[in-house]
Image (cartoon, rainbow, N blue to C red):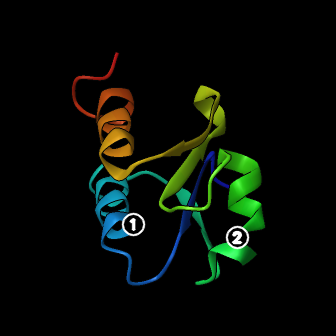
Amino acid sequence: MAAITMYELPGCPYCAKVRSKLDDLDLEYDVIEVPRSHDERTEVEKVSGQTGVPVISDEAEGVEGMHESDDIVEYLEETYGEGAA
């Protein structure tokens, strides 16, 4: 099991943006596909407090339920990119 878990909906362009960054950084991650209906997205809601996707959790860094694709991409770049400490 990878440290990073991504909640996504297939075909979601914001999810694709995050997946692309994860792949560019050559990070291992698990994917959990959420249902189309927001009412059925109980698992991602428990993690993030909302039903939108994408959402990531990164156990290695203590991040749980980060949402908003731009924020996630920025976090991944700062944490795992070339400029990471």
Q: Which residue lies under the disc numbered 2?
A: 41
Q: Which residue lies under the disc numbered 1?
A: 15
Please say if 21 is above or below 36: above
Give the quarter of the image for residue 58.
Answer: top right
User: Which of 56 and 51 lies nearest the eye of the viewer?
Assistant: 51
Residue 53 percent location from the top left of the image: 50, 62
Give the quarter of the image for residue 14.
Answer: bottom left
Q: Amino acid at mark 2?
A: Arg
Quadrant, the C terminus: top left
Quadrant, the N terminus: bottom right
Q: Amino acid at mark 1?
A: Cys
- Going 30% across and 72% down the picture, which residue do you hit? 13
User: Which of 42 and 11 lies nearest the eye of the viewer?
Assistant: 42
Which of the two labelled residues, at mark 2 and mark 1, occupies the earlier sequence position? Answer: 1
Q: Is residue 1 left or right of residue 23?
A: right
Residue 48 percent location from the top left of the image: 65, 46
